[in-house]
Image: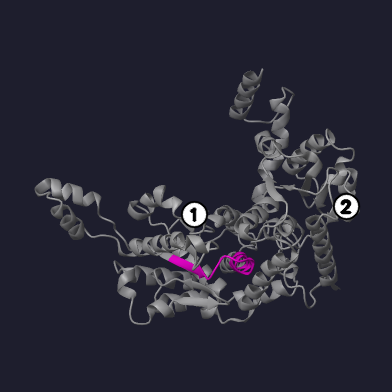
Amino acid sequence: MTELWTRLQDHRKAQGSARIEDLFDADRATAFRVQADGLTFDYSKTMIDAGARDLLLELAAPVAARRDAMFAGEKINETEGRAVLHTALRNLEGSVTVDGQDVMPAVRDTHARMSAFAASIRDGSIAGQGGRFTDMVNIGIGGSDLGPAMAVLALAPYHDGPRTHFVSNVDGADIADTLKGLDPATTLVIVASKTFTTIETMTNAQTARDWMAKAVADPGAQFVALSSAKGKAGDFGIDEARVFGFEDWVGGRYSVWGPIGLSLMLAVGPQAFDQFLAGAAAMDAHFRDAPPARNLPVMLALTGIWHHQICGYPTRAVLPYDNRLMRLPAYLQQLEMESNGKRVAMDGSDLSVVSGPVVWGEPGTNGQHAFYQLIHQGTMPVPCEFILAARGHEPDLAHHHILLAANCLAQSEALMRGRSLDEARALMAAKGLEGAELDRQARHRVFPGNRPSTTLLMEQLTPFALGQIVALYEHRVFVEGVILGINSFDQWGVELGKELALKVEPLLKGEAAPGHDPSTEALAALIRQMRS
């Protein structure tokens, strides 16, 4: 593997000052793209040439065995001794064995219970103490919030259920602003916490319960738990019939396909939710069956490896040209950075290459009037991942969508082509400038170009297409993790700060809390002073 990394780096150096435009021949635009079930991934606007692709595919050789082990239910999350089976939540056929037991009957039973419950809420046969539920509030954090919040917004055209709200931050402003204006008697509260102990979630849940108790006789009857801790949910007042659990082989950031996706199912209905699952299952099948060079997750991952580990670009911008995918970059931040933000390999040794990049982004065209200046003319290239649907959901506003698509394609072209100094000089000369002032003004209008981007294109943002996209990025993270030799399914880096927060809390209350550094003690004292 070390030799392959070296060969890839040597290949990149040998490209020298070559430009992306120079790679285009009669076939590149079609030869450097991959398609599956109506989804197209184009990576032709990168410096990946045929030689680089061959080397990258060699790098991906270990993926197949690890992928098959994951789908088979083997415990590939080795630091926690767990299987990794979020894929089982969306492929409701067949069997998968973990510790000698087929897990699929329980998965199908939970899915059926969710569907029946969602249908009853939506048709009003299950109502609140003030009548039919008009609103629902999902309380969670991390994967229990980012996934469903992203998906609910993305599928807004399909909403025909209760209005959906999300609370995640322990900052009291979040829940106060969300509950303001809602009627407790017609609001359903979903508490999403596998252990029912997550401090931020349970603090918000108790606040919601206190709010509910002021208005209804039985506050627990207005709650649902997405948790495997039935006893704790029962102690909170939630009936066992309204507790939907999931196993430890479903990680939080991979959990939107099961009970954590209940808010989405309530919003769009069981049928549309099943289409969401079907899109993900189709991507699973493609990932398992397609040869590496024609495999969307593999090629998306290898493009990321090329840009970050080989070219040395530290960040990656995800730029959906769809306002309803506004929360996708935040969702992918957790998926990528919590999964692959590691510094040791599976065996505990230090990584010999850098791990995951910083992932960020905003929807177009908003970003064009914010940070695209840096992307076009900053000193460090930022690989951009554009996401676009060929058509929107508003036929009477088709001219909006054409303008949106034109901007998306124009940005990727501009990043690649740029503007030379000679072109900039001609532009300024046409405005009547000359001499030193012409040269000075021209230099401000030079775009270096040769900046890489990819485009992910779908026909329309449907439940099926959204399922495809989310599963695609999940598998992309998996492939990158295998190539880097890390465990993408634990998150020990999340734990330390949470542990220390419990030790800092007494300090803020003026209680004895030894063992803190002078800065933390001084800041806590200042906060106490400001609060008094």
Residue 104: image location, x then y, percent: 81, 71
Span colored in magenta: 454-472
Q: Which residue is nearer to you in this view: 216 or 288?
A: 216
Q: Amino acid at mark 2?
A: Lys
How many other residues sit within 10 Å of disc 1, few (<14), some (14-19) or many (≥20)?
A: many
Q: Tag on residue 230?
A: 2
Image height of 279 relative to 434, above or below: below
Marks 2 and 1 sit apart, C-alpha to C-alpha, by: 39 Å
Q: Is residue 111 magenta?
A: no
Q: Are marks 2 and 1 in contact (CB under 8 Å)?
A: no
Q: In which quadrant of the rendered view does residue 375 lie? A: bottom left
Residue 25: image location, x then y, percent: 33, 80
Q: Residue furthest left?
A: 435
| Dot 1: element | loop
372 left or right of 255? left
Residue designated by label 1 = 363
Image quadrant in which the C terminus is located = top right
Q: Is residue 468 magenta?
A: yes
Residue 470: image location, x then y, percent: 61, 64
| Dot 2: element | helix
Q: Nearer the viewer, mark 2 or mark 1?
A: 1
Q: Amino acid at mark 1?
A: Pro
Closer to the N terminus: mark 2 or mark 1? 2
Can see residue 213? yes
